[in-house]
Structure formats: structure tokens, C-alpha cells
Amino acid sequence: MTTKNNSLSNKTGNWRTHRPEINHQKCIGCSLCAKICPEACIEMKNHKAFVDDDYCKGCALCAHECPVKAIEMKEDF
């Protein structure tokens, strides 16, 4: 079973320490976060970014690239 560009063998598991949280009020739908994500786990829906937490590794590239700082890295418990 595969989803988009990810496979079940690439699921994050429980080792991630941080995850991106997207403020959809701030998101301008530029899709830079989706383009920079090495795991292709950010999808654009209705011009807003959504993260598939099953595949996100917590690298924070999306948060660093967001021009309006709509993505904040939160501790993942």
C-alpha cells in the first residue's frame, strides 16, 4: 500500500521529536512548504497546506521556508 510519494516502509514511527503545526489563518497557499518537503507529506487542499503526520520526519524545512511563518514546530509527545 502506498500513498502519494510515500510508502508504508517510510512511516515515521515514534522517534520524531517535533512536528509542524500549520496556522491556516496565516497560510497564503503558496505551496513552498509542499515543494520543499523531502517526504512529500504536505498536501495543498483549497489553497491551504496540510501535513500527513504519519510520514513527517520533523525536519522543519517547511517551517523555515514559509514566507509568512504560518508553520510552527511543536514538540511531539
Image: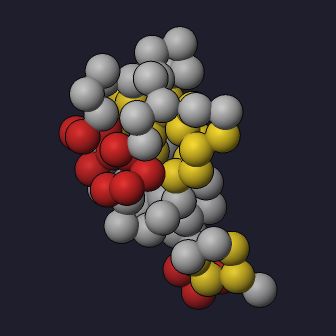
30 to the left or right of 12? left
Q: Residue at x 40, y 35 (%)?
A: 30
> What is the quadrant of residue 64 in the picture?
top left
The residue furthest right is: 1
> What is the quadrant of residue 62 in the picture?
top left
Q: Residue at x 56, y 76 (%)?
A: 5
Q: Picture coordinates of residue 46 (x, y %)?
A: 67, 33
Q: Picture coordinates of residue 53 (x, y %)?
A: 59, 53
Quick check: 70 above or below 56?
Answer: above
Q: Picture coordinates of residue 77 (x, y %)?
A: 52, 43
Q: Residue at x 55, y 21 (%)?
A: 24
Q: Nearer the viewer, residue 47 or 65?
A: 47
Q: Residue at x 58, y 50 (%)?
A: 43
Quick check: 6 above or below 41?
Answer: below
> What is the quadrant of residue 28 in the picture?
top left
Q: Quadrant of the N terminus?
A: bottom right
The residue furthest top is: 25
Residue 31 visible (yes or no): yes
Residue 14 visible (yes or no): no
